[in-house]
Amino acid sequence: MSTLTRLQEPQFSPHTLNKFATLMTAGNGYLGLRACHEEAYTDQTRGMYLAGFYHRSSPLETTELVNLPDILQMRIELDGEIFTLLAGQVVEYQRELDFATGELRRNVLWLAPNGKRYRIECQRFLSAAQHSLVCSRIAITPLDSEATVTISTGIDATQTNSGRQHLDETSVRVFEQRYLQGCYRTLDGSNEVIISSYCALPSESHSSFYAKNRRLTQHCSGLVAQGEAFSLVKTSWIASSLDENYRAETCAEFALQNLMQCVECGYEQLLAQSAQVWNGYWQRSRVKLESVNEEDQIALDFALYHLYAMTPVHNERCSIAAKGLTGEGYKGHVFWDTEVFLLPFHLMTQPHIARQLLSYRWHNLRGGQKKARENGWQGALFPWESAWTGEEETPEFAAINIRTGLRQKVASALAEHHLVADIAWAVDAYYQVTADEVFMRERGVTLLLETARFWISRAVNVNGRLELHDVIGPDEYTEHVDNNAYTNYLAFHNVERARHYVQQFGIQNAAFVSAADDFLERLWLPPANEQNLIAQDDTFFSKPTIDLTRYKQQQGTQAILLDYSRAEVNEMQILKQADVVMLTYMLPWRFTAEQLEANLGYYEPRTIHDSSLSKAIHGVIAARCYRVTQAYEFWQQAGLIDLGDDPHSCDDGIHAAATGAIWLGAVQGFVGLTVEQGELHLNPRMPAQWQSVALPFFWQGTQIHLMLTHQHVTISGAQNTPLTLWLGGKHVSFVGTQTFLLAEFFAPVNGSGTTKGTKQ
Amino acid sequence: MSTLTRLQEPQFSPHTLNKFATLMTAGNGYLGLRACHEEAYTDQTRGMYLAGFYHRSSPLETTELVNLPDILQMRIELDGEIFTLLAGQVVEYQRELDFATGELRRNVLWLAPNGKRYRIECQRFLSAAQHSLVCSRIAITPLDSEATVTISTGIDATQTNSGRQHLDETSVRVFEQRYLQGCYRTLDGSNEVIISSYCALPSESHSSFYAKNRRLTQHCSGLVAQGEAFSLVKTSWIASSLDENYRAETCAEFALQNLMQCVECGYEQLLAQSAQVWNGYWQRSRVKLESVNEEDQIALDFALYHLYAMTPVHNERCSIAAKGLTGEGYKGHVFWDTEVFLLPFHLMTQPHIARQLLSYRWHNLRGGQKKARENGWQGALFPWESAWTGEEETPEFAAINIRTGLRQKVASALAEHHLVADIAWAVDAYYQVTADEVFMRERGVTLLLETARFWISRAVNVNGRLELHDVIGPDEYTEHVDNNAYTNYLAFHNVERARHYVQQFGIQNAAFVSAADDFLERLWLPPANEQNLIAQDDTFFSKPTIDLTRYKQQQGTQAILLDYSRAEVNEMQILKQADVVMLTYMLPWRFTAEQLEANLGYYEPRTIHDSSLSKAIHGVIAARCYRVTQAYEFWQQAGLIDLGDDPHSCDDGIHAAATGAIWLGAVQGFVGLTVEQGELHLNPRMPAQWQSVALPFFWQGTQIHLMLTHQHVTISGAQNTPLTLWLGGKHVSFVGTQTFLLAEFFAPVNGSGTTKGTKQ
C-alpha cells in the first residue's frame, strides 16, 4: 500500500488550526482525536470523542457527544522558553497524516526567542488494532547547546463542549509513581470513562505529579546534550462504560493492565499492529486512480480514511454522526446521511458494517415508534437527529434569533420524514447486495414493516387518492409542502419493499398486506410532465424564480438567508440541495434517461448547493446523463467541501456524508457500478482526466476486483459460482478473471468523450 | 491624590500572565475583573466574579464563585495578522494600574510578523461610581501604512471554573443592531446574571453580529489610515438577581437602559465619575509614607486598592472572600480572615463597612446554629468556609491523595472552631471603636450571645476545670489538640464580652449570665510558665523539634508535607503560622512585654510561615517588642506575598488577608495605633527606613488625621469634644490639632533605633 497518499499541511498558520485539526483527526470508530498540536493555541479546539458517549448538560441544552478529558496537550519549556509556533521563528515545518497507517507526523525546526534552535518531532496514532489505545511520541533535539527540557502533560478534564460541562471527576490517581489514571462520570451518572496514561522518559529525567482543578499532571524535566534527543512516549488507554465487557468494579484495574501491556510493546510495535489493520482495510476498499490531477487520489484516500475513522464497527448501538468523531458540529447526532451517503460504501466493501448501521436503527425502533405514536401515527417515525436512546434529539426550538429574541420550532424534526423511507431503502439495498436472510428475518423485515406502517398511517385521503401532506423533502429551503416527489416515491418504495419481503419471508400479516396494497394502489406519485419534469411538490412549479448567481458563488454559506427570510425563500423556486435529482439518484430504475436529463437541467440552475450533500449527487446524475465533464466538475467541487481553501468550513468537524459522496461519485458515477433491483450494473463514464480506476468490492459474499480503463474493464473474483452483471445493456456471466473491450458494449457518446451502453 | 503610586508590569512575559492578571484585577466590591489582556493567551485565566454569586456544579463539587461570561476578550486582526504578543516583536510595552483611579492602561508598540508596526493602546476601568459598569477602550494606530483592523468581541459564556459549568444561556440578543445582551441563569435556577454591552466604533467601520456555542459576538472591521487610530470603546453593564432592586421581568430592560445612559456619557466622563469616588476613598484611608524604600508605599497603596476592590459594601449578605474577587482560589469562600485581618482596616477608616461585614455573619446565624446543633452543641458554630447561605461550605473530604486514592476528612471544618471567637472579637472591637449601640442591640449582642453559648456548650469538665478538647488553633500543622491557648483565651474573651454586653444593654438572661460566670470561672487559661512561655496546647512542649531551615527557605509552599506526613508533622513542634504569637496580637492587654518577647522568641523559630497570615502578625508583635528591624523585615516580606518575584504565588487570586495585614503592620505595628479595652493607644516604633507616616482614621464618629515622624506626632480632627488617647504611658486629651514631641513620652530603646513608652 506504499502508493497511498498523505495529507499534508502546507505550513503552520494560526488561521487554519481547526481546519487541519479536523482534517487530520485520528479515528478508529471507537474514538476520534482531533489533530491538535501538543502545545496549546487559544483558537485551537481540542477534542476527543467516544462513539455513543453522549450527555446533556442541562435541560436547556441538547444531548451532545462529550468532549472528553484531553491527553495530548503538552506544555513544553525549552530553556525556559514556552514552546509555541507563534513565537520565535518557524524555520521548517512539515505535518502530514499518513493514510496508510493513520499516523500523524510533525517535524519542526524552531528558532526560539532566545536565539537557539530546537528540532521538535511529533508522531501519534490511534490504534486500529486496539481501539482504546492512543500513542504519541515527541522528540526534542537542541541544536545549538545543551538544553533544559520541561514537559507538563497528563489528563486534563477542564475540557468542555464550548463551556458545557458533562463530566464529574470521580477519581484521579498515580500508580507506582508512573501510571496516571482519571475516572470521570457523566453528571447524570449514566456513563463512565476511564483514562489511563503513561509517559516513557529518558532515564535521567525527573518527574513529579500533581492533581488540581480537574487536571492530573505529570511534570517532567531533564537536561539534554546538544544534538541529542529528549524523547517522551505517551501511551494512553481510554475505556468506557459503553465497552462490551465493562464492569464498574474492575474497569479501572483492567484499563491499567491493558495500558501496562501496551507500554511493554513500545511505540513501533504498536504502530505496526495498527498499520496491519489499516492495510487490510485499504486492501478491501481502496479506489485506486490514475488521474492527471493527483488531488483526485488524495480526495478518495482522504474520504476512505475518514470512512474508516468515523465508523463505530465495535458497537451496533452506535452509528455515524454527521461530523463523524472529528468535531462537535451537529452535536454528534446521526442523520439520514448515514443510510444514504455512508452506508453504500460499507455495503459494497464490508457489508457487515452496513448490517451494523442498520442494526443501530433496529435497536432504536422504540424511539421511532414513540415519536410516531406521540404524533398520532403508527409504525416508526425515526428521529431526525438520533443519539444513544433513539429518541428525537433535534432541539425543539432553533437557536434564538438574536434580533427578535424569538425561537422557531425546528421544522426538520416535525416534517422532514423522508429519512424513514431512506432507512427502508438502505435495508432493501443491503439485502440486494448480501442476500443476508438471517438479518432480514431477525431485523430487516421488522424495520421495513414498521417504517411502512408509518407511511400508511401518515397518508391522507384526498378524493380517493392518498397524499403525503406537510412534509419537507431533502431540499430544506422548501418547507411544509404537499406531495414532495422524493418523499412520495421513497415512501412508495418503502411500502412496496416491505410488502415484498413480508411475502418473501412468509410472514403472516394479512392486515398489513391489504393495507399496503391499498397504499401502493392509491398513493399519488407525481408523474413526469410533457417536458419530462417531475414537480418537486404540488406548488413548486407555480412559484417565481430569481437569479441565484450570487448565492451560488457563495454556496455553502446560506447567504440567501441574509437577504430573504426563510418564509420568502420558501415561496420561490430555490433549492438548497438535490431533491428531484436526489430522487432520480435513489431509484434510478423508475426514471428514463430523458427524465434524468430533463430534471437535472431544470433543477440544477435553481439549486444553490448550500448543503454539502448536493454536489456529489448532482455529479452522479450528471455522469448518468453522460455529462461527464460537468460530472467531474461537480465531483471535484464535492471533494473540496472539506479539503478546499476555506479556512473555516470544517472547523467543527468534517462533512462526513461528503466523504461517502466522494466514493459514490467515483464508483456509482464514473465507474458506473450500481445495484438495481438485485442486479449488478456496470456503465462506465470515466472522465477524460482519468486513465484508470481500480477498486475492490463485495458482491453477494464474494470479493471482486475491478480494473477500468477507457478501453477495457477487467473483473476478477468469482472462483466458483459465476459472476453475472449487466455491462451496458448486455448480460454477462463468467468465472474467474475476465477482460471486456468496452467498445463491444458501449457506443461513443457525442461530445462527451465517453461511451454509452446500447441500452440504459 | 497625585502622589498615589502605580503598579507597573515590568515587561510582557508569558510566564507571569496570571500573576499580573491577579495583581491588577479591577474591583469595586460588586464585581472583580481579572486584568487579562484583550487578546487571549492559553495560559491566561480570564475571570469576572460577582460578589455572592455562587453555585455548585454537581454534588461532587463545592459551591464556588461563578466565573461569569467574559466581556473583555477581543480577537484582533491587523492586516490579517492575529494580534498576540507572542508573535512578531514587542518593541515597547508599558502596563500600569493607576491606584488613584483604578484605571488599567497598556501601551504596546508591536512589530507584526508582516513587518509592520502598530501602536495598541488599551484602557479599562470598573466604575467605582456605578458598580455594574465596565468600560474599556482600545486604540490601534498603524504606523507604517493604512491598515485593515478587525476586532471580534462580545459576551462569551464558554467560560467555566476549570471546566465546571454553572450557567445556562437563557437568552442572547442584539438590540437596534448595536446593543448586545446575554442572560444567564445558574443551573440550579437560583440566580441570574444579565450582561449588556455596546461597542462605539469609527463611523466608517462595519459590524456584524452572531451567536453560536454560548458566544454572542460582534465582528467589527474597518480601514484606518497610517498614523490614525482605530478606536473601539466597549461599555458593559452587569446586573444580577442579587441586586437590591432586581425584578425578573424588568431586569434585562433596565440593564439596557442603564447601559444606554452610560454610553451617552462616554469613557472620559464615566472615568471621572469613578475617579471621584476613588479619591474620596483615598482621602479616608490612605497611609502615606516617606520611606527610603519606595516599594513600601506601593505595597500600602496596593493593599488599600485591593481592600477597596474586594469589599462588597453594597450588600450585607456578602462578605470578603479569601481571594477577594480576584480569582478562583478557595472557591470565593469567606474565612476568619475577614474578621481578623480585613475588618480592622475598615473599622478604623469606614466603620460602616465593618458593621456590614459583621451583619453578614448575623444574617447567616442560622447556618452557624445548624452546624452547632448537628454536632451536638448549642449556639452558633459558624462554618469554617462560608458562602451565600451561611452553611458549611468546606468540602467534607480533601482532594484525593493521588498516590493512595484516599480522601481525608477536612479537619478545619471539624475542629478549627476559633473563628467563632474571632467573630465575637470583631464585634467587640467594632463597638469599642464606634460605640454603635443600635448595631449592638439589633445584631451585635445576638452574635456575642450565640457564639458564647457555643463555647459554653463545647467545654468539657475535667475534674472541675473546663477545657476545650480536640480543636485546631490557627496553626493548622497542629491538629486535634486539647486546650489550644489561642482558642481557650479567645473563647474566654468571647464569653466575657457577651456577658459584659448582656449586662450593659440590660438584657434579661439570667440563665446565660449564670452559665457564663461559671464558664469564666472555670475555663482553663494556660498560664505563662517561668520562662514566660505559654504552651500552644496541652502537649506541644512535649513534642520533639527539628531543623526547619530548609522549609523556612521555601516558606509558603508547604514543602514540609513532601517529607513528612501530616500525622508526623502534628507530632513535632512545627508551626504553619502564628498561634500563641497570634494570641498575643489579638488580646495584647492580657500579656506582659516579657511574655510577648519570650513567646515570639520561642515560637518564631518553630514557625515555617507557610500561611500568608503569619508574617505580618509576627511583624506587629516584633514591633511591639521593639525588635523594629526584624519587624520591618517581616512586614516587607509580608508585602511580597503577592508582589514578590514568585511568578505563580497569586495565579488564583491575591492573598486578601495579606493586604489587610500590610495595613495592620504599618498602623498597629509601626505607628502603634491600637484600641485596647475601649481606649486609643499610640506607641510609635517606626523603622529607620521611614521618615514619616501620615494616615487618617475614624474614632468614635470623628475623622482624625495623624502625622508621625521620628521626632513628633501631630494629631488633628476632634473639633468639639476632646480626643483622649494614651501616648506611651501618658493619657493626653486635646481639641483640634496638637503636635507632641515624642521624646517627652518615650525613652530611647537600646539598639533598636526607636523609642519606648515609659509604661507599656
Image (cartoon, coloured by chain):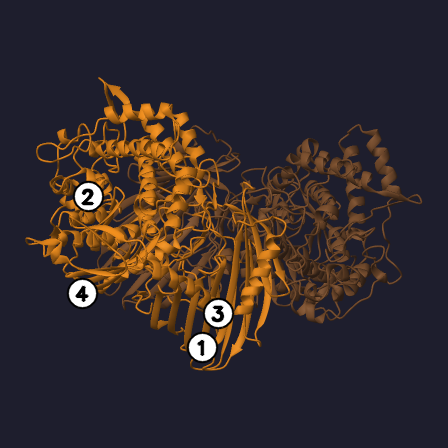
Chain colours: A brown, B orange
Among the two numbered marks 1 and 4 on one chain, the one whose residue lies closer to the N terminus: 1
- Residue A649 is situated, as x and y percent measured from the top left of the image, at 57, 61
Give the mark toward the camera: 2 or 1: 2
Residue kind at label 3, given as amino acid type: Gln
Answer whether labels 1 and 4 touch (C-beta < 8 Å).
no
Residue ID for mark 3: B269
Q: Residue at x 27, y 43 (%)?
A: B678
Residue B608: which numbered mark, if any? 2
Do the residues at discs 2 and 4 belong to one chain?
yes
Image spot of residue B615 (x, y percent): 22, 48
Give the mark toward the camera: 1 or 3. Answer: 3
Which amino acid does the dot numbered 4 rest on? Val
Looking at the image, residue A441 sits to the left or right of residue A573; the answer is left
Q: Nearer the viewer, residue A429 or B744?
A: B744
Badge 2 and badge 1 both on one subunit? yes
What's the CA distance linking mark 1 and mark 3?
23 Å
| Of callouts 3 and 4, the N-terminal one | 3
Tally of marks? 4
The reply to the same-chain question for discs 3 and 2 is yes
Distance from label 2 to label 4 (Cα)? 29 Å
- Rendered view: A366 above or below A734: above
Can you tell which mark lies on residue B141?
1
Q: Residue at x 49, y 81 (%)?
A: B146
